[in-house]
Image (tube, rainbow, N blue to C red):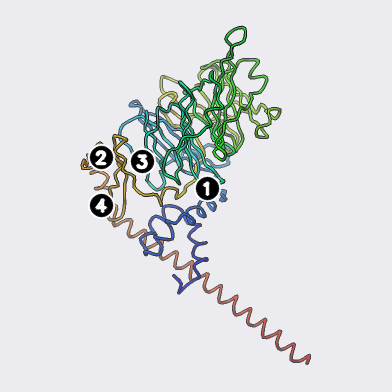
C-alpha cells in the first residue's frame, strides 16, 4: 500500500467506497482488515456517507406479513415528481428466527428491535446484530445517538410502581441505572402503541399525565429523554391540538420534531405539524392536511419530494401509498403488509457494529451465533449453541454457491482500486515535477538579479 500512495490518501479513497466493497476488501490484507475495522475509520466512513446527497435518497420500509413477521426493504426515493424510482427496492434478509420484533428506532443505519424482554441492535448492511442483556421489567424503550460521546444508547423505562430508568451504552456494553426517573410525575402514562422518535439528540415519547384537580383530567404532551445529559424534559403540544383533543403520533421530518394529528383513528383526514425551532412551542406550524376518503390508517413519513407515505386499508390488505398534498392524488407503491405493522424511515449505509465482538449471553435464553463460510458470514438465532437449523444450512449452501462469483467481483474491484491509486500517484508526480520547475525558475531569476 505504501508503494503507491501515502496511508492518509488511501484512507480518503476507502472512506468513499460503499460498505459492500469495504467488507470484501477486508480480505485483501491483515493491514486493510485492521484499518477498516477501527472505530476511527468507521466514524470517518459514516461522516462521508452522511455528506453524500445520493445517500439521502434511500428509505427502509418495514411491513408485516400474515405470520406477523417483519419484512424489510430498501427503497430509492429520488427527488422526483414521478414515483417510478420508488419501485427499485431490495429485500433485506432478516437475521432472526420466526418471531415478532417491534422496531424501536433507527440511527445511522443501526436498528434497535425489541421482542418482549429481548432487545437487539442490528446493522442490515453488514448482516450483523448483537443481543443486549436483559433489563429489569422494562416496558418502554427508546433508541438514539449521543453525539457528545459518539455512543449509541438505549433507554428502558419501567413506569410502575416507581419509575425505573436504565440506559444501555454500546461503548460500555452494559446497562446502568440513572436518577432520571425521580423527575417523572407519579401520574405519567406512556402510549406504548406509538414509537419513539429520535430528533436533536433526544428520543421523544407520547405521554399523558393524570392530574387530580376537581376531577380526573388527562393532559397529553411530549416527553423527551436527552441522551447527552440523560434527563427528561417536557415539550408542549400546539394549542390547536390540545383544544381539539386530537389523537397524535410523533415522527421526524428533515430533522424537525413533527406530529401527525387525527380527529379520530380511521378517519378520512389528518394534519401534519412541524416544530420549526426545536423546543420553542410558538414555532409549531401546520405543514399540510392529508385526505384519503376514510381508508387512511396512518401516516408513516414524508418523502424527499414532499409527498406523504401513508398506510391505507383496501380489501383487508394494508397497502403503502404516496400522497401528494397539493394535487391530492394517490399512487399505490406496490408494497403490501398487515395493518399497523408498517413503518418507513430514512436510511444510510454504515459500518457501525463491525468492530464489536460476538456476544454470547445465556441469560437471554437464546444465543447469537456467528456462522460462516470462507467468504460470507451470517448471524442466526438458536436456542442452543450446538443447534444448526435448516435455515442455517440453507444460508451456508447459498454462501458456497456464491463463493466463486464473489471472488471474481472482488478481483475486479481490487483492480479498479489499484487503477485509482496509480492515477493519483501519477498526478502526484506531475505536481511534484511542476513544483520543481517553479523552484528552478525562481532560482534562475534570482541569479540574473544578482
Give the residue at the far top of this rendering.
214
Q: Secondary structure at mark 4?
A: helix
Sequence-first tag of 2 and 4: 2
Q: Few, some or many C-alpha atoms within 10 Å of disc 1 (few <14, some 14-19, many ≥20)?
A: few
Q: Residue at x 59, y 34 (%)?
A: 253
Residue 371, horizontal then vertical, whole percent: 28, 47
Question: On the rendered image, what quadrant is the C terminus found in?
Answer: bottom right
- Is 210 situated left or right of 38 in this image? right
User: Residue 400, labelled with which disc?
Assistant: 4
Q: Is label 1 in contact with label 2 (beta carbons under 8 Å)?
A: no
Q: Residue at x 69, y 85 (%)?
A: 441
Residue where numbered disc 2 is placed: 391
User: Residue 150, labelled with which disc?
Assistant: 1
Q: Nearer the viewer, residue 385 or 247?
A: 385
Residue 104, horizontal then vertical, whole percent: 46, 33
The span from disc 1 to disc 3 (Cα, nearest Å) is: 28 Å
Sequence-first tag of 3 and 4: 3
Q: Is label 3 in contact with label 4 (beta carbons under 8 Å)?
A: no
Sequence-first tag of 1 and 3: 3
Q: Few, some or many C-alpha atoms within 10 Å of disc 4 (few <14, some 14-19, many ≥20)?
A: some
Q: Is label 4 in contact with label 1 (beta carbons under 8 Å)?
A: no
- Seen in the picture, residue 286 relative to 416 is either above or below; the reply is above
The span from disc 2 to disc 4 (Cα, nearest Å) is: 14 Å
Residue 431, horizontal then vertical, whole percent: 60, 75
Residue where numbered disc 3 is placed: 93
Q: Residue at x 65, y 34 (%)?
A: 278
Amino acid at each position: 500500500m505504501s508503494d503507491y500512495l501515502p496511508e492518509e490518501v488511501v484512507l480518503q479513497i476507502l472512506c468513499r467506497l460503499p460498505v459492500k466493497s469495504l467488507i470484501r476488501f477486508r480480505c485483501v490484507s491483515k493491514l486493510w482488515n485492521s484499518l477498516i475495522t477501527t472505530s476511527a475509520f468507521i466514524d470517518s466512513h459514516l461522516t462521508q456517507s452522511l455528506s453524500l446527497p445520493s445517500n439521502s435518497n434511500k428509505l427502509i420500509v418495514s411491513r408485516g406479513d400474515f405470520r406477523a413477521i417483519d419484512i424489510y426493504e430498501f427503497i430509492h426515493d429520488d427527488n422526483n415528481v414521478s414515483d417510478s424510482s420508488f419501485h427499485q427496492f431490495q429485500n433485506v434478509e432478516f437475521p432472526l428466527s420466526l418471531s415478532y420484533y417491534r422496531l424501536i428506532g433507527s440511527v445511522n443505519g443501526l436498528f434497535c428491535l425489541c421482542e418482549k424482554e429481548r432487545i437487539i441492535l442490528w446493522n442490515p448492511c453488514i448482516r450483523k446484530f448483537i443481543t443486549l442483556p436483559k433489563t429489569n421489567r422494562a416496558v418502554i424503550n427508546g433508541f438514539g445517538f449521543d453525539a457528545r460521546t459518539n455512543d449509541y444508547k438505549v433507554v428502558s423505562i419501567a413506569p410502575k410502581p416507581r419509575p425505573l430508568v436504565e440506559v444501555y451504552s454500546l461503548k460500555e456494553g452494559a446497562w446502568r441505572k440513572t436518577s432520571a426517573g425521580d423527575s417523572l410525575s407519579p401520574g405519567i402514562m406512556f402510549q406504548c402503541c406509538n414509537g419513539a422518535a429520535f430528533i436533536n439528540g433526544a428520543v421523544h415519547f407520547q405521554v399523558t399525565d393524570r392530574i387530580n384537580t376537581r376531577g380526573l383530567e388527562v393532559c397529553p404532551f411530549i416527553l423527551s429523554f436527552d441522551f447527552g445529559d440523560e434527563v427528561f424534559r417536557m415539550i408542549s403540544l400546539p394549542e390547536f391540538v390540545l383544544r381539539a383533543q386530537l389523537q397524535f403520533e410523533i415522527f421526524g421530518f428533515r430533522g424537525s420534531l413533527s406530529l401527525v394529528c387525527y380527529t379520530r383513528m380511521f378517519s378520512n383526514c389528518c394534519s401534519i405539524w412541524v416544530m420549526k425551532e426545536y423546543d420553542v412551542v410558538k414555532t409549531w406550524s401546520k405543514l399540510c392536511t392529508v385526505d384519503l376518503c376514510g381508508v387512511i390508517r396512518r401516516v408513516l413519513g414524508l418523502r424527499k419530494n414532499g409527498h406523504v407515505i401513508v398506510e391505507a386499508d383496501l380489501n383487508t390488505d394494508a397497502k403503502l401509498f404516496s400522497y401528494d398534498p397539493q394535487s391530492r392524488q394517490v399512487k399505490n407503491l406496490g408494497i403490501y403488509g398487515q395493518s399497523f405493522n408498517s413503518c418507513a424511515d430514512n436510511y444510510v449505509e454504515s459500518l457501525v457494529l463491525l468492530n464489536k465482538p460476538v456476544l454470547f449471553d445465556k441469560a437471554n435464553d437464546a444465543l447469537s451465533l456467528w456462522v460462516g463460510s470462507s467468504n460470507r458470514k451470517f448471524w442466526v438465532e438458536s436456542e442452543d449453541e450446538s443447534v444448526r437449523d435448516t435455515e442455517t444450512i440453507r444460508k451456508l449452501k447459498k454462501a458456497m454457491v456464491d463463493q466463486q462469483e464473489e471472488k471474481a467481483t472482488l478481483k475486479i474491484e481490487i483492480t479498479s482500486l489499484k487503477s485509482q491509486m496509480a492515477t493519483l500517484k501519477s498526478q502526484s508526480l506531475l505536481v511534484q515535477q511542476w513544483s520543481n520547475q517553479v523552484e528552478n525558475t525562481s532560482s534562475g531569476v534570482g541569479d540574473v538579479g544578482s
